[in-house]
């Protein structure tokens, strides 16, 4: 099932470059069956945490879409928390890694890896 572009997870240029680098390192860039799975799981200092994995198997009720050349898949429950979120990547002095700009989060923790709604 695909979602419309006004309800999606977006990918910044920096995040796209890092995803491509990681897929290349894992020797899966040229395999079209692989995608980036984005999930929300319980835990973290704010109650909910983001989870990113490469996957090549879809499940019933998965939501699949593409932004900025990156194929993303999420389960329906996680997608409800992730609507209109942007995946970004920082390589600055204040922290290195993927982070999410989530308009649905009422608060986030200092490390940026967990949130609450």
Image (spheres, helix red, strand yellow):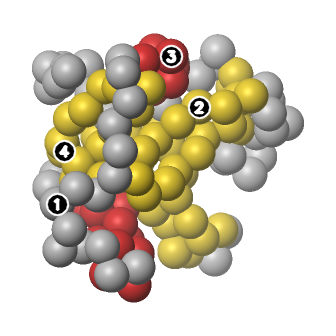
Q: Do the residues labelled 1 and 2 touch (CB within 8 Å)?
A: no
Residue 41 drawn at (x, y percent): 66, 31
Residue 40, labelled with which disc? Answer: 2
Task: Tell me if I can see residue 95 in this picture.
Answer: yes
Q: Which of marks 4 and 3 is nearer the N terminus?
A: 4
Q: How far apart are marks 2 and 4 (CA)?
A: 19 Å
Choose between 52 and 89: the one closer to the eye.
52
Mark 3, residue position: 77
Which residue is pictured at 46% across the width and 41% down the height?
Answer: 38
The C terminus, quarter of image: top right
Q: Earlier in the sequence, mark 4 or mark 1?
A: 1
Choose between 54 and 111: the one closer to the eye.
54
Residue 67, labelled with which disc? Answer: 4
For label 4, the SS is: strand
Which residue is pictured at 55% across the width and 74% down the height?
Answer: 92
Q: Dot 2, crowdedness within 10 Å: few (<14), some or many (≥20)?
A: many
Q: How far apart are marks 4 and 3 (CA)?
A: 20 Å
Q: Dot 1, crowdedness within 10 Å: few (<14), some or many (≥20)?
A: few
The N terminus, quarter of image: top left
Residue 45 lies in what quarter of the image? top right
State how many labels appear: 4
Choose between 55 and 39: the one closer to the eye.
55
Residue 47 drawn at (x, y percent): 79, 26
For label 1, the SS is: loop
Q: Nearer the viewer, mark 3 or mark 1?
A: 1
Q: Nearer the viewer, mark 4 or mark 1?
A: 1
Q: How far apart are marks 1 and 2 (CA)?
A: 24 Å
Q: Distance between the residues labelled 3 and 2?
A: 8 Å
Residue 32, labelled with which disc? Answer: 1
Q: Nearer the viewer, mark 1 or mark 2?
A: 1
């Amino acid at each position: 099932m695909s979602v419309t572009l006004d309800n999606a997870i977006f990918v910044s240029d920096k995040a796209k470059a890092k995803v491509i680098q990681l897929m290349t390192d894992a020797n899966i860039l040229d395999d079209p069956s692989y995608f980036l799975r984005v999930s929300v799981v319980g835990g973290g200092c704010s109650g909910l945490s983001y989870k990113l994995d490469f996957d090549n198997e879809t499940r019933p009720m998965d939501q699949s879409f593409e932004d900025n050349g990156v194929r993303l898949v999420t389960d329906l429950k996680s997608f409800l928390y992730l609507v209109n979120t942007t995946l970004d990547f920082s390589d600055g002095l204040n922290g290195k890694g993927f982070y999410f700009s989530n308009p649905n989060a009422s608060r986030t923790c200092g490390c940026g890896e967990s949130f609450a709604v």
